[in-house]
């Protein structure tokens, strides 16, 4: 998954300030720093809002239940980079099953074998291994929804960074 999200700044407020900024490298650095800060807030928001449903609760398309905390703890944002068209960053997880939970999809039939215990238990039945038929998983879109929830905050933070830079020396 590699979907770009565009952040909108307050044009009426920021445009006059942008016209006064002559140091484009300083502008890029200020926006990248603000992006990194906002990304940390977004990761926290995603973990709290979409990845912290009770483990004994029902499966829900609203988010993910916390069972082992492995996926929730793995969500990270990359360090922002200054690109020709602006500032870019990415957010995601390195856990193998993160993508299918984010975007949805189908799993193939597979065998599940007990590793740490001598048997698997299902409804009072114990087996050393079971054949899983595969399944369809609906996407929870927890990262995308978390980013979309906070787009206005990104825009406001970028606008403030532009105004600060125009006041403090990035201008001619």
Image (tube, grey):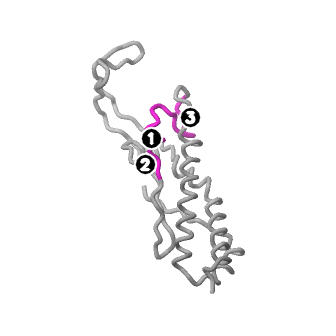
**Which secondary structure lies at badge 1?**
helix
**Which secondary structure lies at badge 2?**
loop
Give the vertical position of 154 relative to 83 (above or below).
above
**63 inside magenta stretch:** yes
Q: What stretch is highlighted in magenta?
A: 58-76
Which residue is located at x 56 percent, y 70 percent?
30
> Which is nearer the eye, 60 or 32?
32
Which of the two labelled residues, at mark 2 and mark 3, occupies the earlier sequence position? 3
- As measured in the structure, the alpha-carbon distance from the residue carrying label 2 to the one carrying label 3 is 18 Å
Quadrant where the image shows the C terminus: bottom right
Label disc, if present, on residue 71 of the rendered structure: 1
Residue receiving disc 2? 93
Horizontal side, residue 152 vs residue 134: left or right: right
Quadrant where the image shows the N terminus: bottom left
Horizontal side, residue 164 vs residue 137: left or right: right
Give the vertical position of 75 relative to 155 (above or below).
above
Residue farthest front in this picture: 168
Label disc, if present, on residue 53 of the rendered structure: 3
Q: In which quarter of the image is residue 126?
A: top left
Q: Where is residue 106 in the image (x, y as percent from the top left)?
A: 38, 41
- As measured in the structure, the alpha-carbon distance from the residue carrying label 3 to the one carrying label 1 is 13 Å
Which residue is located at x 40 percent, y 12 percent?
124
> Which is nearer the eye, 143 or 156?
156
Horizontal side, residue 62 vs residue 72: left or right: right
Q: Are marks 1 and 2 in contact (CB under 8 Å)?
A: yes
Answer few, some or many: residues within 10 Å of disc 1's Cα (few below 14, many 20 plus, some between 14 and 19): some
């Amino acid at each position: 998954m590699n979907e770009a999200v565009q952040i909108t700044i307050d044009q009426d407020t920021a445009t006059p300030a942008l016209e006064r900024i002559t140091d484009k490298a300083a502008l890029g650095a200020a926006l990248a720093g603000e992006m990194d800060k906002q990304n940390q807030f977004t990761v926290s928001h995603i973990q709290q809002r979409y990845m912290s449903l009770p483990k004994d609760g029902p499966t829900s398309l609203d988010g993910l239940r916390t069972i082992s905390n492995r996926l929730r703890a793995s969500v990270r944002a990359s360090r922002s980079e200054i690109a020709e068209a602006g500032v870019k960053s990415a957010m995601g997880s390195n856990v193998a099953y993160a993508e299918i939970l984010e975007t949805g999809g189908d799993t193939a039939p597979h065998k599940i074998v007990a590793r740490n215990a001598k048997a698997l238990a299902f409804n009072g039945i114990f087996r050393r291994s079971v054949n899983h038929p595969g399944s369809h998983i609906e996407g929870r879109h927890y990262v995308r929804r978390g980013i979309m929830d906070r787009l206005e905050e990104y825009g406001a933070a970028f606008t403030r960074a532009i105004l600060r830079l125009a006041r403090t020396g990035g201008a001619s």
